[in-house]
Image (cartoon, grey):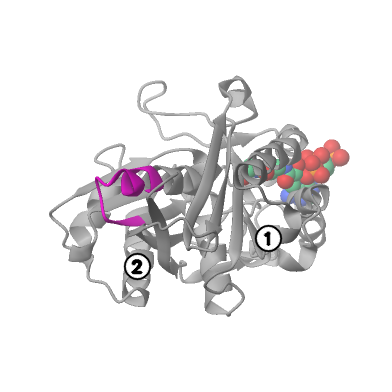
Amino acid sequence: MKTTRSVILSTGASLPRRVVTNDDLSKMVDTSDDWIVQRTGIKERHLADDSETTASLGVAAAKVALAEAKLEPQDIDLIILATSTPDHTFPASATEIQASLGITHGVAFDLQAVCSGFIFALATADKFLTSGSHRRALVIGSETFSRILDWSDRGTCVLFGDGAGAVVLEAREHLGVKAERGVITTHLRSDGRHKGKLYVDGGPSSTKTVGHLRMEGKEVFRHAVGMITDVIKDAFAAASINASDIDWFVPHQANRRIIDASADKLGISRDKVVVTVEKHGNTSAASIPLALDAAVRDGRIKEGQLVLLEAMGGGFTWGSALIRW
Ligand code: UT7
């Protein structure tokens, strides 16, 4: 049994100023508000302007989370940024965030697992904290997917948005009491055979370009619900709980239909599901921390509740995390 638990102290979020509605997009590509809402649930998304980057959005979200936790940047000794859209090929945008926050100790690095990035980063931070090597972590999901979209491809450009969310985690002694706060269990998976279904057609080592997102939407959809439910069942088994024990289900926000189908298959009541996809679109690694922040801020998620996270994305990668908030 773990003697330490990683407790989430606070959340923060940052969204680009510009809001783009489905009607705005219908002036750019052959689409409609009806089609986008029916197929995805998305109504609008925030898109970064030239002055807003993955690092700047990440810094803004991190500052909110630090203020909420009543901590100073110097209290943080680990920063993990989940992103597939870094400001530069290198250095890691996490180190840019570290420098912007004025932190010169500890370690900061990027982690890339596309839409599952936040869960992978949270699980990684949990391992660092529970091992005793680090004490307080900022886990950030920040993305500017608008930079890698093909704005002539209506099958993908209507789906994504930009933004950043962050959480502060602290290592605390775990006394072994069942209702104790913290990350209870995390489950990560990947299967690289699915690369061609969701990928970016460029990169420094292959094309020497940044490239554009390509997706076989139907194929991703077909795999999503099964993968999501499998990894959640792993979490239930590890924690000896079932769907009725969950207070809040905070899934990756890709598509309302995927979220509903996953909740239904698992037997999680729809009124326990946090949904922000209508306002943010799919913000990849930022979607879960943005949804967490929304639900904490409006009072739904409260201390002591059982919160279940899941995500699935390019790779494929997928994962779940169960947290006593
Ligand atoms: O973050 C994890 C990764 N991403 C996902 O989880 C996304 C998974 N996939 C999806 O969410 C859905 O597959 C989509 C929303 C991408 C598409 O929904 P769909 O029900 O699978 O539609 P479809 O791709 O089968 O397209 C149906 C029709 C096609 O027309 P035809 O061939 O039936 O005449 C498309 O050309 O809809 C057409 N279409 C559009 N029409 C209006 C595709 N995109 C659009 C659009 N506006 N933006």
Residue shown at 70% from the left, 37% from the top? 230
* Numbered disc in front, either 2 or 1: 1
Look at the picture and state if 250 lies above or below 13: above
Estimate the spatial distance between the alpha carbons at disc 2 and disc 1, rounded to whole Å.
30 Å
Q: Is residue 166 left or right of residue 136?
A: right
Amino acid carrying mark 2 in the image: Ala
The verdict on residue 30 being magenta is no
Asked if ligand 1 lies within 8 A of label 2, the reply is no
Q: Quadrant of ligand 1?
A: top right
Q: Is residue 75 left or right of residue 67?
A: left
Q: Where does label 2 land, which residue?
A: 60
In the picture, the disc for residue 246 is: 1
Tell me if I can see residue 46 in this picture. no
Instruction: Answer with the quarter of the image where residue 213 lies.
Output: top right
Instruction: Answer with the quarter of the image where residue 1 lies.
Output: top left
Residue shown at 56% from the left, 32% from the top? 189
Amino acid carrying mark 1 in the image: Ile
Instruction: Judge by depth and name the residue closer to the eye, 44 or 301.
Output: 301
